Image (cartoon, rainbow, N blue to C red):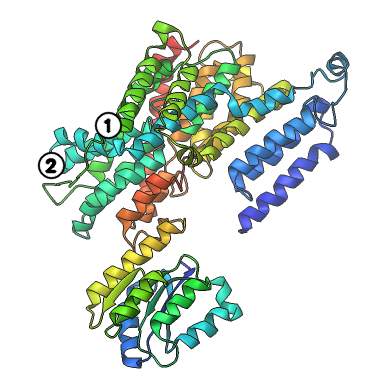
Amino acid sequence: MTTLQKAGLILGISGFLLPFIVTFDGLSFPGHLALSIFLFAAFFWMLEPIPIHATSLMVILLGVGMLSAAGPIFNGMDPTLAMDTYGFKPGSAASYVGTLANPIIILFLGGFMLADAAVKFNFDKNVTRVMMKPFGTKPKWIMLGLMTVTGLLSAFMSNTATTAMMMTVILPFMASMDKNDKFKVGLALSIPFAANIGGMATPIGSPPNAIVVAASARAGHMISFMEWIVLALPLVIIAMLATWWLLYSMNKPSVTEIKLNQSSKWDTSIKACLFYMTFGITLVMWVTESLHGISSNYVALIPIAFLSMFSVMEAADLRKLPWEVLWLVAGGIALGIYMEETKLSGWLVSRIEWSSFSGILILGMFALIGLVISNFMSNTVAATLLMPLAITIGVTQGGTGLANPTLLALMIGLGTSFAMVLPISTPPNAIAMATGVVKTADMAKSGIWVGLIGIILMLLFSILYWNNVVH
Amino acid sequence: MKPEYLIICVEDEPEVLDAVLRDLSGFESHFHIEGFSSADAVRDFLTASSAGTIHPALFICDHMMPGTTGVDFLVEVERFGLADGAKKMLLTGQAGLQDTVKAVNLGHLDFYLAKPWTREILVESVKGLLTAFIRDNGINPLPYLTVLNAEALTDSLRSDRRLTDR
């Protein structure tokens, strides 16, 4: 265990015990219990003495034990009495455990099924091969092509898996390049950066997006699949182009031509075709929600059911799905519910007189905090910890104007995805770093620029665009 | 980085052992490399308490040696699980067909390299075997991208989902 992990262990346990020892003015008894869970989770998630998905499960366990009617504390207590005494109705254990099957979790599960099936049939490699063709052989356009494909794939697959796949495309070429060619650095950074940015394009692109959708839904607005794309895609495209220009001008090539050798063939087996069909149907249903009215969360049951039914994804494939990501998100959603139900988040934000701040300042502040802290921790965790506070501020501000809950949630979620300064910021960055081509200083310099561009773009989008469509 | 895995070279002729170790020096940054003059010496080393913390990744074994032959030793390693998951290479000029068959069938030999070898071929083969070792044993491949087959290792990241978004 590293020193940081030890510190996390001690701080997490101390934080958990604190509300049992100290009584905070204006915070109810259930609020104290929720604060206990919050402090424990915050330190454990940030410093990771145990894996972050394990902390999430602890959050659910502690919630059921300490806050639900099924736990020892509120077991058998009359709800009316609890309401009169604490202003809190003991939660239902089923709803806390139910976060593991929250509709947004089902949406992600559907996405995972499609993504893993895509890898199984080399769909991702084939898409890359076909899409790279029009970009020719000039280094400048090759880089844009690689970023475009990476962004597109990572909007549907995990950013990490996309980065790993795209690295296999550029590694042979990078190995053949001159040792001192700066363009190598640019290429090696372009892939993870494009993956991080591409993950913002759809709700299933990256786990923090799930926290955004879940939080916004609890505040009263369900962001549909298509609505997310309409909101985020223009931002993604502009950020991608800016990043491309930045990386290219900072790392000019000495070669004039790049040839990527890719040999892969479309899989035409029956199972592969069933996958293509399922993918097509799901995608069409996702983006046409406004026509048929079926929530994208439940459309996700189509790939889950179809791919299982046709044995495209077999039991062994199901076992390999990244379940821990779903647990991580579920714990984050659960913590948000506890903080809201016990009014802990209201108590926390009431420390500051928010009405004296302008909406744009609040938005910018949360986006910036999200961006900064998630450079040092999991993006999902960063979003999870900020979200309940932001949503509460949004709701108490009357839920209108710039600082409305949905817009705040979006700023935090996207802000965390713009964090790409350090190798530890995101797994895609770690992969790029591991190739040995990139130095931390290169990554930090470009990453800071991308973060700044991201914040500025998000604020512009809030004022000029999102503000007019999200209420 | 601090090496966690071990390459074991067994060869009774000191000059040959030196040549092998010299050829493999490029892996020293990421792997411990130990040379032994006999199978018995390796056995002692593996059973000694200090060996428990460092796991063998690859055996590179000569065949004709005093005491236990290379093939018999590799069979022993396989049968008694002395090094689960480790890859095995026979580097020899003198293993007959029967011995070689035995090494493959009972010792689960991964690679046969005939003496005399060239540095390039030895390094490439070892690179391939170590890459397979990292991939097959579910070890985080990121620290090894610079010395092993980066393409194969990143591809395993993609399909094995060893690393996920977080």
Q: In which quarter of the image is the N terminus of chain A?
A: bottom right
Nearer-the-camera pick, A30 or A156: A156
Mark sitting on residue B86: none
Q: Is residue B143 visible?
A: no
Q: Which chain carries label 2?
A: A
Give the labeled residue for mark 2.
A137
At numbered mark 1, what does the secondary structure look like: helix, strand or loop?
helix
Question: Residue A337 occupies which quadrant of the picture?
Answer: top right
Kind of residue at disc 1: Leu
At numbered mark 2, what does the secondary structure look like: helix, strand or loop?
loop
Give the labeled residue for mark 1.
A241
B57 on left or right of A101: left
Nearer-the-camera pick, A94 or A2: A94
Answer with mark 1 or mark 2, whichever residue precedes in sequence: 2
Question: Residue B120 occupies which quadrant of the picture?
Answer: bottom left
Nearer-the-camera pick, A212 or A455: A212
Report the residue that reaches farthest toward the front: B98
Residue B34 drawn above or below residue A341: below
Q: Is residue B152 visible?
A: yes
- The structure residue drawn at horizontal position 30% and vertical position 43%, both measured from the top left corner, is A166
Kind of residue at disc 2: Thr
Question: Residue A439 occupies which quadrant of the picture?
Answer: bottom left
B121 on left or right of A189: left
Q: Position of residue A137 (x, y in %)?
A: 12, 42
Q: Residues within 10 Å of mark 2 (few under 14, many from 20)?
A: some
- The structure residue drawn at horizontal position 53% and vertical position 43%, both measured from the top left corner, is A377
Q: Position of residue A30 (x, y in %)?
A: 80, 27
Q: Do labels 1 and 2 share a chain?
A: yes
Q: Where is residue B166 in the image (x, y as percent from the top left)?
A: 50, 40
Tell me if label 1 and label 2 are in contact, CB under 8 Å: no
Q: CA–CA distance between discs 1 and 2?
A: 19 Å
